[in-house]
Every structure is written in structure tokens, then in C-alpha cells.
Image: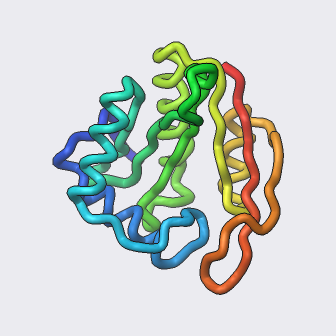
Amino acid sequence: MDIALRPALAADAAALAGIYNHYIAHTCVTFETEPVEAAGMAARIAETADAGLPWLVAEGSAGILGYAYASKWKGRCAYRYTVESTVYLDPASTGAGVGGRLYAALIDAIRACGMHAVIGGIALPNAASVRLHERLGFREAGRFEQVGWKQERWVDVGYWQLLL
């Protein structure tokens, strides 16, 4: 699949919200429960850029296939070299290698920002996300049991870590 990777723009917000809203409505991979509007997504893109962190988009001939970004892990100063990574794909783009290329590019961009550690949180079970993280060098760092309630069930969250 021919894809281009580029920084996210405010003009991408509606398409990114559309991708994300699918996961809000139909899965437990995000703990958000209400749809995100384009304006809210544009504000998130701007917040990430203002923090000096990357937000990337994968684009194909049919439009945006997915996105990935880094966010601050915690607000305390000692955490300043650690970020949390996030990746979402249009459901029609899964299984085609887009996620791996996008996530690898995000890791390179995070490294270029001078970060030391990347944390990936995964709502469990999610074998595909675990495989993706481990293929990129992440190691399981811990698991919190039953910390989220969504779709009428308790959801565990595992954390994977990559030291740069």
C-alpha cells in the first residue's frame, strides 16, 4: 500500500475524529465514551504541537488511513523525558502494515525530540496491539486489572515500555 506520512494539520481534525469516534463507539481500546468533535480534535493536535511533540498522519490515495501521536506521560518535571504513544487506524486500513510504518515513524520522531522512554497503554485483551508494540521493541512493564468500565464490563490495561 502506498502511503505518505506527514505531520497532522488542523484541517485533518474531522477525519481524525471520524477514525477515533469509531473506537469510542465500538471498542474498549479507548476509555472515552463520548464522540469527539472536529474542533476538539483540532485542539488536541494544537496542544501536542505546543508541547513540541509529534502527531503524524498516514495518508493514502483514498484519504487519511490513521494517525499516531505522543503526549506527556505525567505533569511532574521529572517525567519530562517520557511520553505516552498512541496510534489509531481507520478500521479499513488495519492488517496492511500501515500501523507498523506509522508507529515506527512516530518513535523516530519521539527520539528526535530528545525523549528517553515511550509508554504504550493497551486495553486488554488486544493481541494485535501487543504484537505491534513488541515488534517495535516495547517490553511489557505492568498491568492494572479492572481499571476501566466500558461496554458493560471491566477492562484491564497493560503498559508496554520502550527505552530509546
Work out whether 69 lies above or below 81. below
> In this image, 143 relative to 53: left or right?
right
Q: Nearer the viewer, residue 51 or 61?
A: 51
> x%, y% of residue 51?
38, 28
Residue 62 visible, this orientation: no
Q: Which of the image's four quarters has the C terminus? A: top right
Q: Determine whether 98 is above or below 144 in the image.
A: above
Identified at 54% across, 33% down, the residue is 75
Q: Position of residue 116 (x, y in %)?
A: 63, 18
| Residue 98 shown left or right of residue 19 in the figure | right
**Residue found farthest to the bottom:** 152
Where residue 158 appears, as percent x and y from the top left, is 75, 53
Residue 136's place in the image compared with 2, above or below, is above
Which residue is at 45% across, 43% downward? 68
In the rendered image, which quarter is residue 2 located in?
Answer: top left
Residue 19 drawn at (x, y percent): 38, 63
- In the rendered image, is residue 21 in sight? yes
For the point 71% across and 39% down, the residue is: 135
Residue at 52%, 13% (x, y): give it.
114
Q: 9 or 37, which is in the foreground?
A: 37
